[in-house]
Image (tube, rainbow, N blue to C red):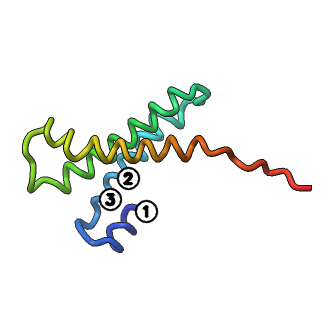
Amino acid sequence: MGLTEDLLGGGFIGLNALSKTTTAFLIVKTLALKKLDNTILNYGGVALCIFAHDLVYNYIYGQSEYFGFFPFLFRRVVPVFLYNFILYVVISLIPKKSGKRR
């Protein structure tokens, strides 16, 4: 998926693939090995994965404008992370259709 995004969107070839691979690795290591009945644990795991993706992607993509770790973190990573995480929470709260048909 990441390589497809790179090919269609331009930019650095492999950057989306790398950041999505890192995220997938974290998902497998933190989420897939445990049954997530706890909603807070589920949201925390997803937040960790989204944050890792945004950190890797923005760190490599923004190397030319690097101005220290904490300013970089709060100017580039945190706003994108909050947007993606809030979108995830909103979508996850939409009730699912029941699969029953008459």
Do callouts 3 and 2 mark residues in contact (Cβ within 8 Å)? yes
Name the one closer to the observer, 67 or 21. 67
Query: Which residue is depicted at the point 20% across and 40% down?
Result: 73
Q: Where is residue 58 in the image (x, y as percent from the top left)?
A: 23, 51
Do callouts 3 and 1 mark residues in contact (Cβ within 8 Å)? yes
Name the residue beneath numbered marker 2: 20
| Distance (Cα) linking label 3 and label 2 | 6 Å
Indicate left or right for 48 with 102 as reference. left
- Amino acid identity at mark 3: Asn
The tally of labels here is: 3
| Label 2 residue SS | helix
* Vertical arrangement, residue 78 with respect to residue 11, above or below: above
Mark 1 vs 2, N-terminal side: 1
Name the one closer to the observer, 42 or 13. 42
Q: Residue 16 carries which label?
A: 3
Name the residue beneath numbered marker 1: 1
